[in-house]
Image: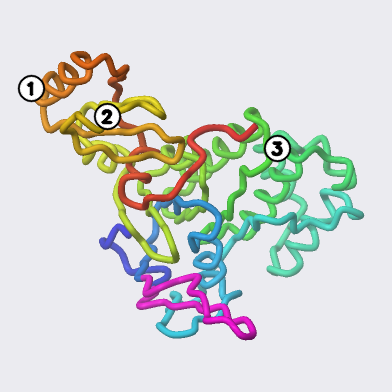
């Protein structure tokens, strides 16, 4: 996405259709154009069914396109953390990683395994079977597995789903450390969580298999203005001349153009006794504005 380097992956007019008997085909991807360059740090943001996982599978070569094209750079080294667990639960941590090293023909694998596991604070668990690990520790092992070959492009498909807050923070911190050590590596992660996406340099908002907006989190939020005016669900606003946007939770949001308009709208609401609130816009507001689909704004319960 940087445009300043030769692309690692370039996808043009990508369409993926899923066909079922007696029904019209549904498009998991619908005319997507996407380029990934060295050093890119991109979050694919959207709810389940928006096309994120399909796009990652296409990039990884695991999903055939119905139409369109995909080109990968020669000798592209790819690392993937799948949404579903990909480790053998009956093998130890070390055995899982040795298997991965053998698949990639890595020389002196034990040295690299021990170094990467030490960075993830799991070097003391090398002899433990994967089935004995917590979800957070298993995810860190999967992260080490994905970077063991020192990839050019790291794909992460909803890697923080189901993790508690400390485990999520540890995994996201590991991504930061990797990019600090190897700034040339490109990272593309799918997520439906705002707090995860906000840590990335670029956010691609997806809905219905399409890209609906792209930019840095700061840019996307700034496009909504500096303040939002809102009223709670069920508030009677029929007599108020304000361009409301209905939210998934039933609240209504409006975007005043300036302080004067905010003051005017607030005065109208106060004059008829309608409760209201004023706050700064968030990345969730930006997604809801352009994609019109509900998202989870924080940490899942």
Residue beneath label 3, please?
118
Magenta segment, which residues?
11-32
SS under mark 2: loop
Mark 3 lies on a secondary structure that is helix
Measured along the vertical axis of the image, is residue 184 above or below residue 294?
below
Q: Is 289 left or right of 185, judged from the image as shown?
A: left
Whether residue 156 is situated above or below residue 298 in the rendered picture: below
Q: Residue at x 41, y 52 (%)?
A: 42
Q: Is residue 118 above or below residue 151?
A: above
Magenta stretch, main secondary structure, is: strand
At label 2, counting other C-alpha atoms closer than 10 Å, the crowd grade (few under 14, some 14-19, many 20 or more) is some
In the image, residue 272 above or below residue 124: above
Which of the two marks, 1 or 2, is nearer to us in this view?
A: 2
Res 165 → quadrant: top right
- Please rate how many residues cluster around mark 1, counting C-alpha atoms within 10 Å: few if below 14, some from 14 to 19, many from 20: few
Q: Which residue is mark 1?
A: 260
Image quarter for residue 273? top left
Q: Mark 1 or 3 closer to N-term?
A: 3
Residue, far left: 260
Tag 3: Cα neighbours inside 10 Å, few (<14), some, or many (≥20)? few
């Amino acid at each position: 996405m940087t445009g300043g380097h030769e692309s690692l992956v370039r996808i043009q007019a990508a369409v993926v259709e899923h066909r079922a008997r007696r029904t019209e085909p549904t498009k998991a991807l619908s005319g997507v154009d996407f380029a990934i360059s060295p050093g890119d740090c991109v979050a694919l943001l959207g709810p389940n069914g928006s096309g994120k996982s399909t796009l990652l599978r296409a990039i990884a070569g695991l999903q055939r396109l119905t139409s369109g094209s995909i080109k990968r750079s020669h000798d592209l080294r790819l690392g993937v953390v799948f949404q579903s667990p990909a480790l053998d639960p009956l093998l130890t941590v070390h055995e899982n990683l040795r298997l991965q090293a053998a698949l990639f023909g890595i020389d002196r694998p034990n040295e690299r395994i021990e170094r990467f596991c030490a960075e993830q604070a799991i070097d003391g668990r090398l002899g433990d079977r994967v089935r004995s690990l917590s979800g957070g520790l298993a995810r860190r092992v999967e992260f080490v597995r994905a970077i063991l070959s020192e990839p050019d492009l790291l794909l992460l498909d909803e890697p923080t789903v189901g993790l508690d807050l400390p485990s999520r923070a540890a995994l996201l911190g590991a991504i930061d450390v990797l990019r600090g050590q190897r700034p040339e590596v490109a990272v593309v992660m799918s997520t439906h969580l705002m707090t995860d996406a906000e840590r990335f340099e670029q956010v691609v908002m997806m809905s219905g298999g399409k890209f609906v907006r792209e930019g840095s989190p700061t840019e996307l939020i700034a496009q909504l203005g500096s303040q939002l005016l809102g009223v709670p669900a069920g508030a009677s606003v029929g007599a108020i001349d304000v361009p409301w946007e209905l939210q998934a939770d039933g609240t209504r949001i409006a975007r005043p153009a300036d302080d004067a308009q905010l003051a005017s709208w607030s005065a109208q609401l106060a004059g008829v006794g309608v409760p209201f609130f004023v706050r700064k816009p968030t990345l969730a507001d930006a997604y809801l504005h352009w994609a019109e689909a509900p998202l989870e704004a924080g940490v899942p319960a």
